[in-house]
Image: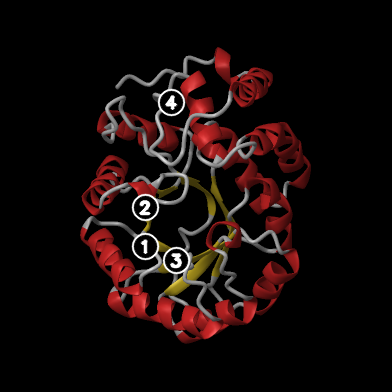
Amino acid sequence: MTMRTDWLRGCGTALVTPFAADGRVDEARMRALVERQLAGGVKLLVPCGTTGEAMTMTPEEQTRVMRIAVETARGRARVLAGVGSNSTAVTVERARAARAAGVDGVLVVAPYYNKPTQAGLIAHFKAVADGVAGLPVVLYNVPGRTSSNIQAPTVLTLAREVETIAGIKEASNDLTQIMAILRERPQGFRVLSGDDAVTLPLIALGADGIISVVSNEVPDLMARMAELALQGNWTAARELHYRLLPLMEANFIESNPGPVKAAMALMGLLEDQLRLPLVPVQEKTRARLREVLQELGVLQRPAHVAA
C-alpha cells in the first residue's frame, strides 16, 4: 500500500534558482521567490530540478537551496527536492542530504545518458527508496531530457512493491501511458503532470495536480487553475487554462529555464543569469515573452522582489 501523501496535490512549483552576476546562488532572492510562491497560494515547492539548473550546482549548493526552501516555508508549504542523477550511488547520497536538510520528499528523475532497461530502472528506484527509508519518493519521467522512458508497467510495479514510492511526475506527453498508470495505480499513488499545457486534461483524467514552470511567473493563477480543475469547476478552469496557454507555450520556445528566467527578469523578480551550457534567450524570444506577459497584465503589477 502506498504511503499517505495528501500534500502531493494541486500546484507545485519547479523553482528556478536565482544566480547573481558573479554566478553565485542569490540566497536573498531565493528566499523572496519562495515567499512569493507562498503568497500566491502554492503549497508544494520543488527546488533543484530541471528548472532549478540543479545539474550545474555543487552538492553543497543544492543542499543550501533545499535548506532555504525548507527554512523559508516554515511549514507553510511542503518541499519536494530534486535529487536525481545518472548514478544510483550519487542519487542515494543526494537523497540523504535532502532528508538531512528537512525536505518532505525527493523527486528522482530517471537516470539520463546510461539508458537503463526497465529492470535497471526498477532496481535504481528501489535502491534510492531503500537508501532513504521512510521518506516519500516521487518518480520523474521526462524522456525528452533523459532518453529513458519509465514505462507504465514499471511505474505500477514500483508503486505496488515499494510503499514509499508515492507518486510520479509524468512529462512523457504519452497520454496512453499516463492513462494506464491512472487506471491501474494503487490507492494513494499520486500522478502529477510535468507539463503545464496538459495539466487540465490530465486532471480531468484523474491526475492529482502539476509540478509547474509557469507558476514561477504567475503562482496565483496557476494554483487557482489547478484547484478549480480538482474541484470539478471545468468552465472556470478552462478559462484560466486558455488565458495561461500562451505563457505556457512561450516558456518552451527555447530550452527551459531560459525563457522563464527571461520572463521573471522582465517582471523584476531576478537577474537573467543562467549557468553554462545554458545561455540567455534570443531577443525574439524575449520580445514574445514581453508580449505575452503584457497580455496577461503581469508587467503592470508591482512585481519587483527586493534582494
Q: How far is disc 3 from disc 4 in space, using C-alphas?
A: 35 Å
Amino acid under label 4?
Answer: Asp
For label 2, the residue is: 79
Counting from the top left corner in percent of width and height, residue 252 is at 62, 40
Closer to the chain start, of discs 2 and 1, is 2
Q: Mark 4 points at which residue?
A: 272
Q: Name the residue under label 1.
A: 105
Above or below, 159 against 72 in this view is below
Q: Which residue type does callout 3 highlight? A: Thr
Secondary element type, mark 4: loop
Q: In which quarter of the image is residue 147?
A: bottom right
- Mark 4 Cα shell of 10 Å, populated few (<14), some (14-19), many (≥20): many
Q: Mark 3 points at which residue?
A: 5
Real-space Cα separation, disc 1 to disc 4, in angstroms:
29 Å
The image quadrant of residue 155 is: bottom right
Q: Which amino acid does label 1 sit on?
A: Gly
- Is 190 positioned to the left or the right of 15 in the image? right
Q: Which of marks 2 and 3 is in front?
A: 2
Disc 1, SS:
strand
Query: Which is nearer the eye, 20 or 224?
Result: 20
Q: Distance between the residues labelled 4 and 2?
A: 25 Å
Determine contact: label 3, label 4, CB under 8 Å.
Answer: no
Q: How crowded is mark 2: few (under 14 residues within 10 Å), some or many (20 or more)?
A: many
Please tell me whether mark 3 sits on a helix, a strand or a loop.
loop
